[in-house]
Amino acid sequence: MTKHYDYDLIVIGSGPSGRRAAVQASKFGRSVLVVDRRGKVGGVSVHTGTIPSKTLRETVLNLTGWRERGIYGMNYRVKQNIDAQDLNMRLGKTLDDEVEVLEHQFLRNGVSVEYGSAKFVDAHTIEIENPAGGSRRVRGKAIVVAVGSAPHRPHNIPFDGTRVIDSDGMVNLDRIPRSLTVVGAGVIGIEYATIFSALDVRVTIIDQREHILDFIDREIVDDFIHQLRDQSVNFRLGGALESIAIEAGQPVAILEDGRRVRSDLLLYTGGRQGATGDLNLAAAGLEADERGRLEVDPITFQTKTPNIYATGDVIGFPALASTSMEQGRIAACHACEQPVPPAPKFFPYGIYSVPEISIVGITEEEARKKKIPYEAGVARFRETSRGQIMAETQGFLKIIVCLETHKLLGVHIVGEAATELIHIGQAVLNFGGSFEYFIEATFNYPTFAEAYKSAALDVWNRITPRHAGIGEPPAISPESSAPQRMKTKPH
């Protein structure tokens, strides 16, 4: 007897992984339903996460004239008096445009969309409760859980939406605070801390760890912290938060070691939790961990219930919009019984702070731990012509190279356009290229991308014998033709 299904694929959630899964399945000619409880497509990424925070960052950098201060001085501003309305105007327009694009994408690909809260009835059936109070059940041959995540909100933190907030509250501010305390020096906390520091808000970052961003190359982090201290960002590291008190209308963070930090606004960023609480997972034979996350096969993204997949933030690390999209695509391919493309071995990680950080591949610390013979090359942005034009006095690009094979192992960038520049290194890594590629390639001039050539030449100068006329470096003058190929290579 043939089982009846209303849809070949049901996707719960319309964030990056959900929409990519839905569109991919539709490209295979499958019937697809997307269910979203928000009332607008886009998920957390569009409405409270990735897009709002990056829009806020760009708005702040533009209105403050941050990128031009190296030329015109720290007092330079495009707009003298910046308020929350200035920030919200651009944010609202960006989100509306993003939703419109996604709605059109679903429409032209024949993807059905229904708004409401979904919960499992069994492994193939979900019940959708619509905002008006009605409900209906639909059956899907395969189901993708792409519900995203929400800020972790411990019971001992006195969230009130005005003085003590989580990261969702940062996109709904009705005023710009004069001072801000950020509890948690993870990616989200660091991004918002630096964005508001660029607004000349006095910022203090609290974290119980002695070091921040442990997964980033240590030299990059050290330079990053130095730049933040130059921006008057204060750090209170190595002390756990004991409590938060409200004194004279202001939140006061009290640390276990007795230190106290007072500010107009306190942002608590204690990680995120998978938004699986209302899905009735047990009915589908599933169980989430203590942070609401689902365990999946890392190749197919199937849960332990074979016809149910999970993608995006709900499965945990790396919880990036970029990787989530790939997870959704791969899950849809497998669910539609199509060849499953392998996920790229190397993917970039971007932190949209001020300044930006982006990495791909392994760090120096990882190379040493794995006992890989390596050399590192560094190019300072201030040494590039583009850096001089933009008065970029800080920031650098570093490459890690294997001494035995000359293959590129990692790229690490801090500074202007880091999240854009990283893709050059990503491509060379995924194709197994050597660092000589950067020396022999021709880059537009003047650009920050030329830093790859400078960093590669830095490696070349460190590892190539320089005696008896052997190993003369290739020409790199921007006015010259393509650089000569190296005459010798180290063994």
Image (cartoon, rainbow, N blue to C red):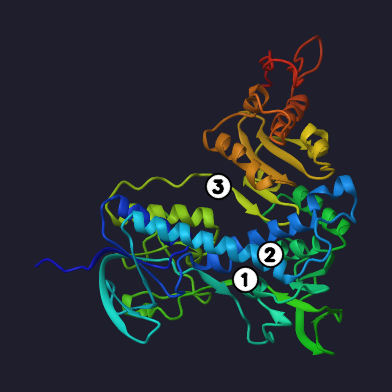
Query: What residue would you read off at disc 2?
Result: 186
Q: Which mark is residue 271?
A: 1
- In terms of secondary structure, where does tag 3 sit? loop
Whole-number angstrom distance, CA of label 2 to CA of label 3: 19 Å
Q: Give the quarter of the image for residue 140.
A: bottom left
In the drawing, does residue 236 fall left or right of residue 146?
right
Indicate the position of residue 176 as horizontal and vertical percent values: 77, 72
Mark found first going from the N terminus, 2 or 3: 2
**Label 3: which residue?**
347
Marking on residue 401: none
Residue 364 in sight from this viewpoint: no
- The furthest residue to the left: 1
- Of mark 1 and mark 3, the one earlier in the sequence is 1
Q: Position of residue 367 (x, y in %)?
A: 66, 43
The answer to which of 176 and 434 lies nearer the viewer is: 176
Tag 1 near tag 3, CB within 8 Å: no
Q: How many marks?
A: 3
Which SS class for mark 1? loop
Please give the name of the residue rendered at 58% of the width and 40% of the height, measured from the top-left corner. 426
Give whichever of 227, 171 is nearer the camera. Answer: 171
Q: Amino acid at mark 1?
A: Gly
